[in-house]
Amino acid sequence: MGEQDNEQVDQTLERLTEVGELPAPGQGQAPSVEAVQAECERLTGQNAELADQLLRRRADLENLRKRVERERQEVHVRAAMDAAASALPVLDGLERALAGDQSAASEFHAGVELIARQLRETLIKSGLEPIEALGRKFDPHIHEAVERVETTEHEDQTVVEEWQRGYRFRGRLLRPAMVKVAVRPESR
């Protein structure tokens, strides 16, 4: 046995004496070196097992922290999406008012146009993205076809009219665009 082994044995003997597992020197028979080494190995194994458990608990805690942070961010995004979705009918109404006869009351029209622009810009800053539909290929993931029109003037499955604009919010579909889609006439 080397110097380091002797120190380890002495330390183990002291610990065992302190906890009452060994008699104090001069109070009984001293344990054999093999018994002390076996106890040392057992304690070393137990120490390794506890260290492994500690590492696993730390990893579990870190995973929990990350999951809670992701969920918190998801709740934040969902709340912002709900707020943007509730503002869309107002924006739709303003845009319909702007699409009407502009000659009747130009000052009123200019005021409504200003309000609509401010609302649109505010929503865009918060993450709202309008979906371009007119003239694009119909995509059922972002468009909702409310009417089909048979025509040869447009390519098959092309959006020819947008009834209600669709929006994404931070890359997620908030509302699909309601569109009229061109289809080729059926040959009979």
Image: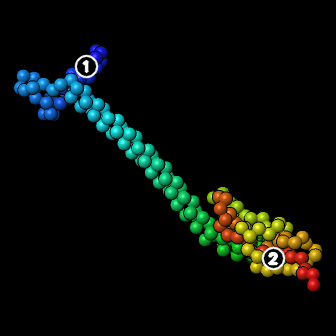
Quadrant including the N terminus = top left
Q: In this view, does 27 lie above or below 180?
A: above
Q: Which residue lies furthest to the bottom in this view?
A: 188
The reply to whether residue 165 is in sight is no
Sequence-first tag of 1 and 2:
1
Q: Is residue 186 above or below residue 110?
A: below
Residues packed near mark 1 inside 10 Å, few (<14), some (14 to 19) or many (20 plus): few
Which dot, 1 or 2, sits closer to the camera? 1
Mark 1 sits on what residue?
7
Tell me what residue is drawn at x 85 percent, y 67 percent: 135
Residue 52 image offset from top left, x and y in percent: 38, 39
Mark on residue 180?
2
CA gap, disc 1 and disc 2: 87 Å
Residue 102 falls in which quadrant of the image?
bottom right
Quadrant including the C terminus = bottom right
Residue 34 image offset from top left, x and y in percent: 22, 26
Tell me what residue is drawn at x 93 percent, y 74 percent: 153
Tell me what residue is drawn at x 42 percent, y 47 percent: 61
The reply to whether residue 46 is in sight is yes
Residue 23 placement, left or right of 61: left
Name the amino acid, label 1.
Glu
Residue 89 falls in which quadrant of the image?
bottom right
Name the amino acid, label 2.
Lys
Which residue is at the front of the view, 109 or 85? 85
Residue 159 placement, left or right of 32: right
Residue 73 image offset from top left, x and y in percent: 53, 55
